[in-house]
Structure formats: structure tokens, C-alpha cells
């Protein structure tokens, strides 16, 4: 029983640290050391750098008119912004539709080799010092480019992560996803103030073009790898919460699960390729952030959720101290709430965060499925889009309509 008690309490401590303690740690470090901030950009338009806005679009013809309109509405000097779409593999009208728009440049090949191949082919043609990468189904706030470019005033900054916001459609999937991204936004802000963000979401991030890393063609979380490799090189990855990318939530929980499993498989793949970052003696604060914010979520903590539940049940059945009955009861209530969330998953949300336990369960269940898929080598890097609640209408810019924001990419994703 002593070993079981030790397993229970150590596992419980790991779980609490992963989902609450890490947030407290970064908050405390920022309080002690002070936030690392970059001054506002006071440069006139004539001194702003050239920027390429790169959008990878696979069969996105239905939404491209709205996307192009959104890009053209960005507040950045026209002569300093190139809008580049790469539509490799698309079998719809995307290439021809974009070819008729003089303000944008389009690259297209009929072969479908995946997003990474398309992005890297496009990056080889980019001549601007800064590249902003975003998705075709996300819509950017007007100040996005200006806000992200501002951080590159500091030579130590190699990449900038934008803010992802999820447009709620009122069911379990969108409610839980939005709540998750709000917490992720808080962690990103504090990570950036302490040292740097640990991976950016593919919906919106910017890099110094010269620092862009090519990654293996089978890479699943290319956005996460791109920014972590820049951080590994010794550059900071900062967070620009005012640079907003909005997208609709997954169409339903099934689609969200598909997306999460892919992310988790990519998480295991990324961890296997970023093993040196586990060494805090070499990478210092970056390693602590990487382990605390990413690695634990993708590996040990989901495993210990199951171990702690089983250990707790055995301790109660053996009549050990009454406190274990309370902890088991708390776990039972949480998982009952998750079951209730599953049963009510398609209904409108009446209480904010009601579906959080269900979404939390889906996230951690995805880690098991993702690991199995990674182990079997069954996850393709070729584009595999999850269906969104509404991909033909531009999200409303009003804050009240969003439940928002995130690495690799969590990124459990």
C-alpha cells in the first residue's frame, strides 16, 4: 500500500502541476524577474520591412473570396506586402480563382505532396526578411502584420506567434475548444513575458525568413517544429495577442477528435526529433518551458490520469484512509460530468465551461490514440482537414462572438 500511495500522490502532483502548477510557475517567474517586453513600433511606413503573407490552400475555393478580401484589408503598406497563395494538389477552382486577382501571387502544382512540401516550395521564392504564415480558413485582424512585425525590432526575436480565436457554434466541441484556447492564450502570454513561446499555432505565426528551417517531409506539426527549431537556435519566439486569427470550431466532437489525434501523433513525432531540448543544462529556461507546457501534456500526464484513478480505486477497496474516498468521489464526479457532456454534446451551451470535463477527456484520450498512431507510423503528413462548423462565412469581428484563444501544434495540442 505504501508504494500505491506514493504512486497516487506523485501522479496527482504531476497532474496538478501540468494543468495548474505550470501556469502558476510562469506567473511567479514573471513577477520575480519582470516581464520581457518589446517597445511599440514607432517607425513610419517608409521604414517598415518588406513582408510576405504566405497562405497554403488545399481545395479552399469556397472560402477564398472572403480570405482574399480579408488579406487586402490588412493595415500594412501595399508596396511592402506580398500576398502569396500556394495551392499545390488542389483539384477545385482555387488556382484559377486566385489567378484572376491581380493583387495576389499564386503558385500551383497539380501534384499533392502535402502542406510542408507546398510551403517549403513557396518559401524558396520569398525574398522579404519576414514571412507571415497563415491558413486559408482563418481571418486576420486588420493590425496583424503591423503587430507581428513590431516584435522583430529586437534582434533576439526569431519568430512571433499570433493569437488564435475559436468561433463558438454553441455545442460541446466549440465550447470546450474555446475554453481551452483561452487558457492557452494566458500561458502563451506568460511564457513570452518569461522567455518565449514554446511553439506557435499554424493558424498564424511569423518568422525571420533567413531562419526558416526545412523539416522532414513526413512532419505532422510543421508549425510547431518551425518555431521550436528557431528557438533551439537561440532566438526567442514571442507572442502577439493583438494579432488575431479567427476560425470556426470543429463541426462536431468527432471532427475535433480527429484533429486532436493528428496533433498528438505529431506531438510524439516532434518530441522524438527534439530530444536535445529536454536538457535544461544546455537550453535552460527553454527546456523548462518545453517540458512543462508541452512534453508533460503529450506524454506522462495522460498516462498518470489513468494510473491515479486505478490506484485510488484500489486504495478505497482496501479500506485505506477516508481521504481516498473523497478523492475518488471527486474523480467520479468529474468523469460523470464528462459523460454528461458527451450525452449533451450537440445541444446549445447554457453554462459557460459546462463541457470542459468532456473536452478535457477528449484531449487526453487523443494522446493515447495519437501515441498508438505514431507508434504504428500510420499518420500521414498530407493535408487532412477537419470539418469546421462554417467554412463559407467570414467570422464576425465582434469579440462577443468568439471564445478565444493557443504547437504544436495544443496544442493536448
Image (tube, grey):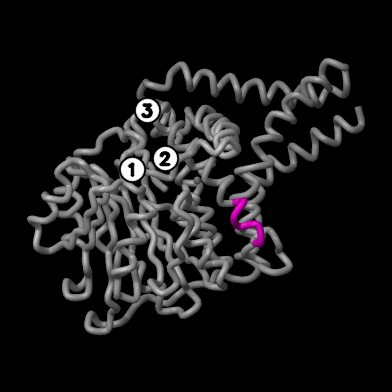
Residue 316 at what x, y percent from top left? 82, 19
10 Å crowding of disc 1: few (<14), some (14-19), many (20+): many
Q: Which residue is mark 2?
A: 178
Q: Name the residue nearer the viewer: 31 or 22.
A: 22
Residue 300 at what x, y percent from top left? 69, 41
- Which range is magenta? 271-276
Residue 256 falls within the magenta-colored stretch: no
Q: Secondary structure at mark 3?
A: loop
Q: Name the residue nearer the viewer: 246 or 60.
A: 60
Q: Which residue is mark 1?
A: 402
10 Å crowding of disc 3: few (<14), some (14-19), many (20+): some
C-alpha gap between disc 3 and disc 2: 13 Å
10 Å crowding of disc 2: few (<14), some (14-19), many (20+): many
Mark count: 3
Position of residue 141 in the picture relative to residue 231 (left or right) = left
Residue 87 at what x, y percent from top left? 24, 51
Of callouts 3 and 1, the N-terminal one: 3
Cβ–Cβ below 8 Å for labels 3 and 1? no
**Between marks 3 and 1 in the image, the one whose residue lies nearer the viewer:** 3
C-alpha gap between disc 3 and disc 1: 17 Å
Position of residue 337 in the picture relative to residue 66 (left or right) = right
Quadrant housing residue 302: top right
Cβ–Cβ below 8 Å for labels 1 and 2? yes
Position of residue 370 in the picture relative to residue 15 (left or right) = left
Of callouts 3 and 2, the N-terminal one: 2
Question: Residue at coordinates 35% horizontally, 38% vertically from top-left?
Answer: 385
Question: Residue at coordinates 17% horizontally, 47% vertically from top-left?
Answer: 94
Q: Which residue is mark 3?
A: 252
Q: Name the residue nearer the viewer: 218 or 101.
A: 218
Residue 68 at what x, y percent from top left? 17, 54
Amino acid at each position: 500500500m505504501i508504494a500505491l500511495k506514493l504512486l497516487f500522490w506523485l501522479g496527482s502532483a504531476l497532474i496538478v502541476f501540468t494543468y495548474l502548477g505550470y501556469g502558476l510557475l510562469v506567473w511567479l517567474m514573471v513577477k520575480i524577474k519582470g516581464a520581457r517586453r518589446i517597445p511599440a513600433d514607432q517607425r513610419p511606413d517608409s521604414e517598415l520591412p518588406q513582408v510576405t503573407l504566405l497562405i497554403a490552400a488545399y481545395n479552399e475555393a469556397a472560402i477564398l473570396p472572403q480570405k482574399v478580401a480579408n488579406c487586402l484589408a490588412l493595415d500594412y503598406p501595399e508596396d511592402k506586402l506580398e500576398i502569396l497563395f500556394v495551392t499545390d494538389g488542389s483539384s477545385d477552382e482555387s488556382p484559377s480563382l486566385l489567378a484572376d486577382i491581380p493583387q495576389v501571387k499564386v503558385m500551383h502544382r497539380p501534384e499533392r505532396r502535402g502542406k510542408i512540401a507546398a510551403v517549403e516550395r513557396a518559401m524558396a521564392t520569398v525574398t522579404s526578411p519576414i514571412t507571415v504564415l497563415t491558413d486559408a480558413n482563418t481571418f486576420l485582424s486588420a493590425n496583424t502584420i503591423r503587430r507581428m512585425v513590431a516584435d522583430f525590432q529586437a534582434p533576439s526575436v526569431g519568430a512571433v506567434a499570433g493569437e488564435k480565436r475559436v468561433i463558438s457554434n454553441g455545442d460541446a466541441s466549440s465550447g470546450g475548444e474555446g475554453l481551452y484556447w483561452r487558457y492557452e492564450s494566458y500561458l502563451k502570454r506568460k511564457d513570452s513575458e518569461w522567455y518565449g513561446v514554446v511553439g506557435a499555432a499554424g493558424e498564424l505565426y511569423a518568422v525571420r525568413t533567413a531562419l526558416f528551417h526545412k523539416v522532414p517531409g513526413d512532419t505532422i506539426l510543421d508549425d510547431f517544429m518551425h518555431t521550436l527549431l528557431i528557438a533551439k537556435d537561440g532566438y526567442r519566439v514571442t507572442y502577439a495577442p493583438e494579432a488575431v486569427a479567427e476560425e470556426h470550431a470543429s463541426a462536431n466532437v468527432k471532427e475535433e477528435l480527429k484533429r486532436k489525434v493528428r496533433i498528438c501523433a505529431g506531438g510524439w513525432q516532434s518530441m522524438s526529433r527534439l530530444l536535445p531540448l529536454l536538457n535544461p543544462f544546455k537550453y535552460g529556461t527553454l527546456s523548462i518551458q518545453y517540458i512543462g507546457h508541452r512534453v508533460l501534456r503529450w506524454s506522462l500526464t495522460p498516462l498518470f490520469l489513468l494510473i491515479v484513478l486505478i490506484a485510488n480505486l484500489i486504495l478505497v477497496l482496501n479500506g485505506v484512509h477516508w481521504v481516498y474516498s473523497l478523492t475518488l468521489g471527486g474523480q467520479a464526479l468529474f468523469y460523470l460530468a464528462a459523460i454528461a457532456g458527451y450525452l449533451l454534446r450537440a445541444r446549445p451551451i447554457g453554462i459557460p465551461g459546462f463541457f470542459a470535463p468532456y473536452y478535457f477527456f477528449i484531449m487526453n484520450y487523443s494522446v493515447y490514440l495519437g501515441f498508438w498512431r505514431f507508434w504504428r507510423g500510420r499518420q500521414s503528413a498530407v493535408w487532412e482537414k477537419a470539418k469546421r462548423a462554417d467554412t463559407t462565412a467570414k467570422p464576425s469581428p465582434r469579440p462577443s462572438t468568439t471564445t478565444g484563444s493557443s504547437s504544436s501544434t495544443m496544442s493536448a495540442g
